[in-house]
Amino acid sequence: MSRSKKWRLEWAFFLGENGRRQYNKLCKGCVHPCKQSFRAVVVSCPHYLSRRSQKCRN
């Protein structure tokens, strides 16, 4: 099965040195499909709230 060029370009951001998909540390254990690459810094995630952000709100 061949993959399209568009698919390869899209997933190139997620591929690590070993050629496998790698996700961000926060996204590894998450069950939601909105996973981010290990190269990206998590700016906001609708499904993740840290304890620090909850303390700042109060």
Image (cartoon, rainbow, N blue to C red):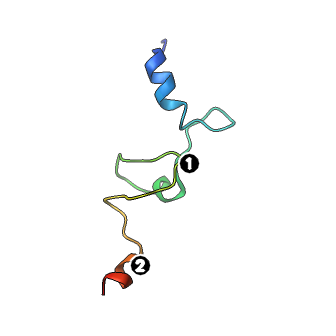
The reply to whether the C-beta atoms of the residues labelled 1 and 2 are less than 8 Å apart is no
Q: Quadrant of residue 15?
A: top right
Vertical order, 50 against 5 (above or below): below
Vertical order, 3 against 27 (above or below): above
Crowd tier of the residue under label 2, counting other residues whose Cα lies within 10 Å: few below 14, some 14–19, many 20 or above: few
Give amino acid for label 1.
Answer: Phe
Say which residue appears at 63% left-offset and 38% top-offset. 16
Vertical order, 53 against 22 (above or below): below
Q: Mark 2 highlights which residue?
A: 51
Q: Secondary structure at mark 2?
A: helix
Give amino acid for label 2.
Answer: Arg
Left or right for 45, reference 29: left
Residue 4: give x, y in percent of width and height: 45, 15
Please tell me which residue lies in front, 1 or 25: 25
Crowd tier of the residue under label 1, counting other residues whose Cα lies within 10 Å: few below 14, some 14–19, many 20 or above: some
Q: Mark 1 highlights which residue?
A: 38
Q: Secondary structure at mark 1?
A: loop
Please tell me which residue lies in front, 30 or 9: 9
Say which residue appears at 54% left-offset and 38% top-offset. 14
First of labels 1, 2 by sequence position: 1
Q: Which mark is residue 10?
A: none
Residue 41: give x, y in percent of width and height: 51, 54
Left or right for 26, reference 45: right
Say which residue appears at 60% left-offset and 35% top-offset. 20
